[in-house]
Image (cartoon, helix red, strand yellow):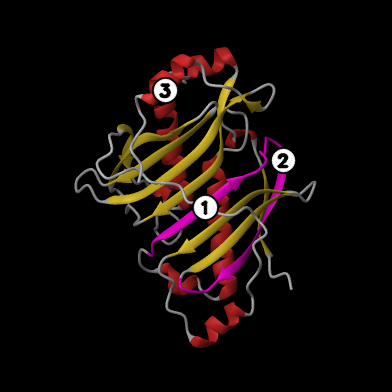
Amino acid sequence: MDHWSETYRGSVPPWECDVTEHFTIGYYFERIGTASLNLLEELGLLEPLRAGDTPRRFEARFTRELRAGDSYHIESAALAPAPALRLGHRVVDSATGETVTWVQEEWEPAPELAVELGRSIEQRLAEWAGPAIESRPEPSPGAATVPTAGGRATPSDLDEHGRFTPGAFVHRFSDASLQTQAAIGMNARYMQANRRGFSTFELGLRIARCPRLGDALAVRSGIAHLGNSSLRFAHRMYDPRTGQNFAAMSQFGVQLDLDARRPAALAEELRARAAALLVRTD
């Protein structure tokens, strides 16, 4: 039986598109955050998860881009109740019915569920038909990284429960990505002159704890993979006063030819500068 249910429906406004001329990943995650809350409420888990700082992780695979004017909806389902609560989300092009993005969300550890509630979830589990989640090596402790973002948690970063949202994390890491690109020569002038962009096809977000309103935050980044046209950025957000981690994000993507909408090889000068930012991974 298909236990996927619709948890969001909307469209892509032009002002939510980025310099790569497609839907910004931060806005994908704003909508995924809304879809997640709607699913948790449907499962009877919203109240248990409102309190505290339960660690979460998201794994996303973007299989086709959404652009300005596209309509889409999100379908969500529970995939596993234990040992960690695992949810699935699929972003569907409403015009074609094609799934364009797959997201798995995991709450670690799972909330303490009543026996009856656990049984209810067990009976509503759906099958995952999306791509397999690939494990990516993380930067080694002490790996050399560069500062790429900083600021404070603002009211617009928080949801109705006062928690820093997944979308807010991804927006901050997107800023860090642009800073990292600029550090290797993929700056705005280069991108505009060469009709190039950076297109993310895989994203892994791990949330250890959330900044509170007014908390200072900072991001450091490095490059964990350098390919012909591909780069994987490794970002870490932390409290600059204590050094404690808030979150980390792995962002795998390609340099994109904005006219052909195809990957474009990195120029040798960019590759040389990117190589200087490569970090050791475990």
5 lies above or below 182: below
Q: Residue at x 45, y 57 (%)?
A: 57
Q: Confirm whether the magenta stretch covers residue 77.
A: yes
Nearest to N terminus: mark 3 or mark 2? 2
Residue identifier under label 2: 70
Q: Residue at x 34, y 35 (%)?
A: 279
Q: Identity of the amino acid at label 1?
A: Glu
SS at mark 3? helix
SS at mark 1? strand
Q: Check disc 3: other Cα within 10 Å, few if <14, some if 14-19, many if 20+.
A: some
Q: Is residue 164 visible?
A: no
Residue identifier under label 1: 59
Contact, mark 3 vs mark 2 (Cβ under 8 Å): no
245 lies above or below 6: above
Q: Is residue 232 visible?
A: yes
Q: Identity of the amino acid at label 2?
A: Asp
- Name the front one of labels 3 and 1: 1
- Name the front one of labels 3 and 2: 3
As drawn, the residue found furthest toward the right would be 96
Q: Nearer the viewer, residue 275 or 77?
A: 275
Q: What distance separates the C-alpha of mark 3 from that of mark 2?
A: 29 Å
Nearest to N terminus: mark 3 or mark 1? 1
Residue 210 coordinates in the image, percent (x, y): 35, 55
Nearest to N terminus: mark 1 or mark 2? 1
